[in-house]
Amino acid sequence: MRFNFLDNQDGRCYIEDFLSGLDEETHLKVINKLGDFESFDQAHLFRAEHIKKIEQGVHEIRVRTRRKCYRFLGRIRGEEFDVVHVYHKKSNSIPMKEIRTTRNRLNNI
């Protein structure tokens, strides 16, 4: 599965902005994990619970480092995942704010 970090209408990439704010070690771990995921097909990632459907048209990719969990939100198109939002997971449920942000960004691309 291929991951696309989509820009907004202003040409800004929220995902790259978020990742650049991480310390270098964590940044590399997250990027490497996503790179590993690209070698698998969608069915495998669902079975391994790395991807989860949140609602119609919105999915999440789960990336865990030693200390933290990150959720990349977006949509699936064939064997591609368009990522429009990312956040640091702190609780068991996805905050509605994160889902609304994802919906808004998907509607604006």
Image (cartoon, rainbow, N blue to C red):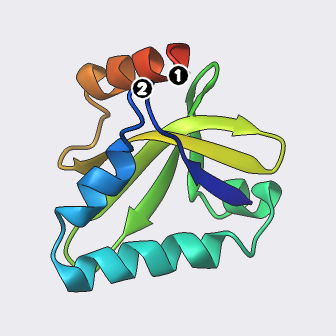
Where is residue 14, by image quadrant?
Answer: top left
Give the left or right position of residue 10, taking residue 36 as reference. Answer: left
- 26 to the left or right of 80: left
When the figure is inspected, residue 21 is found, relative to residue 102, above or below; the finding is below
Asked whether disc 1 touches disc 2, contact meaning CB atoms under 8 Å apart, the reply is: yes
- Callout 1 amino acid: Leu
Image height of 28 relative to 106, above or below:
below
Mark 1 residue element: helix
Q: Quadrant of residue 75?
A: top right
In front of the other: 64 or 81? 81
Rendering coords of residue 47 (x, y %) = 71, 59
- Taking depth in this image into account, of 98 and 21 the one nearest to the observer is 21
In the rendered view, would you say 103 is above or below 71? above
Image quadrant in which the C terminus is located: top right
Q: Bin the neighbour count of mark 1 within 10 Å (Cα to Cα): few under 14, some 14-19, many 20 and up.
A: many
Q: Position of residue 7 (x, y in %)?
A: 47, 38
Residue drawn at (77%, 64%), measured in percent from left and top?
44
Residue linked to disc 1:
106
Q: Position of residue 94 (x, y in %)?
A: 32, 33
Q: Secondary structure at mark 2?
A: helix
Q: Amino acid at mark 2?
A: Thr
Give 44 or 58, whichever is nearer the viewer. 58
| Disc 2 crowd, CA 10 A, few/some/many (<14, 14-19, 20+) | many
Q: Which residue is mark 2?
A: 102
Q: Is residue 71 left or right of residue 69?
A: right
Residue at 46% over, 57% down: 62
Q: What's the residue at 27%, 52% (across, down)?
A: 17
